Amino acid sequence: MTTTTPHRHGLRDFYENPAVPVASGPARTLRQARVLAAALGPSTEHPRTILDIGCGDATAAATAAPLLAGHRVIGVDWSQDALTRARTRLPCTVRGELTALPLRTAAADAVLFSEVIEHLVDPDTALAEIHRVLRPGGHLMLSTPNLAAWYNRALLLAGVQPVFSEVSLRAIHGRPGKEVVGHLRLYTARALREFVTAAGFTVVGLTGAPFHGVPRPLRALDRLACVRPQLASILLLHARKT
């Protein structure tokens, strides 16, 4: 199956295009927000600064907001179009590149990094920058699609390109789905743990979350797969700056 999309000249043009999806699913956003709220504690005692890096249109931040009430959430993105939309939901936003975040060292207590790392050319520098802007002991909440999701294992055995993977920014080739989403890198649970640890973080927990794009008849099975993160559609990782 091949689906075409309007021509784009490069990564920046791709992400500045309003038609490109910039929001993650609400179910996994709420899971992350619950873990983070428990880790940070009540905002009445000590309001914290949370960076939503790669905030997109701030749909995820708005979904998480009730669970993080009282804490200060700052959206960061490189797409001006996404930030324009984000400002309708999030009062404080900053435009910046992940390779050089416009924030001082140890400025944040926590970072939300949802559905971003799979889009990056240079994830090493991105994690180094996140490590820099977090205070010692600060929290990283990262989510990303799982290359080894249960259905991707079956697809590979059948010789089909895995879900979430891309071979082109202009069209879908050889995999299920109708939407080009610009994924450049995909991680298994083991690879993600090792990568984040090597960047100077201690992994606190790794859980799974379902994917909203799974066909309805298979959604119960997708939820069941979350019992084992290695098989889940989405990986949710909680780490702390070492």
Image: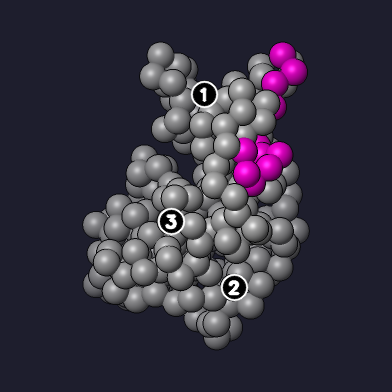
Q: Is residue 169 magenta?
A: yes
- Please name the residue shown 71% across and 68% down the image: 125
Rate crowding at label 1 as few (under 14), some (14 to 19) or many (20 or more) other CA atoms within 10 Å: many
- Please name the residue shown 65% across and 59% down the image: 10
Would you say 85 lies left or right of 66 here?
right
Spatial separation of the CA atoms under disc 1 and disc 3: 33 Å
Asked if residue 151 is positioned above or below residue 9 in the image, the reply reads: above
Residue interval drawn in magenta = 158-171
| Image x and y of residue 231, in percent | 60, 27
Residue 18 is labelled as 3
Q: Amino acid at mark 1?
A: Ala
**Of pointers 2 and 3, the one earlier in the residue sequence:** 3
Residue 97 is labelled as 2
Q: Secondary structure at mark 3?
A: loop
- Please name the residue shown 61% across and 28% down the image: 2
| Image x and y of residue 181, in percent | 55, 44
- Please name the residue shown 28% across and 64% down the image: 89
Residue 225 is labelled as 1
Would you say 93 lies left or right of 77 here?
left
Residues marked 1 and 2 touching at CB (< 8 Å): no
Q: Is residue 192 magenta?
A: no
**Residue sitting at the far bottom:** 104
**Of pointers 1 and 3, the one earlier in the residue sequence:** 3
Nearest to the observer: residue 120 or residue 137: 120
Would you say 27 lies left or right of 238 here?
left
Spatial separation of the CA atoms under disc 2 and disc 3: 19 Å
Q: Amino acid at mark 2?
A: Glu
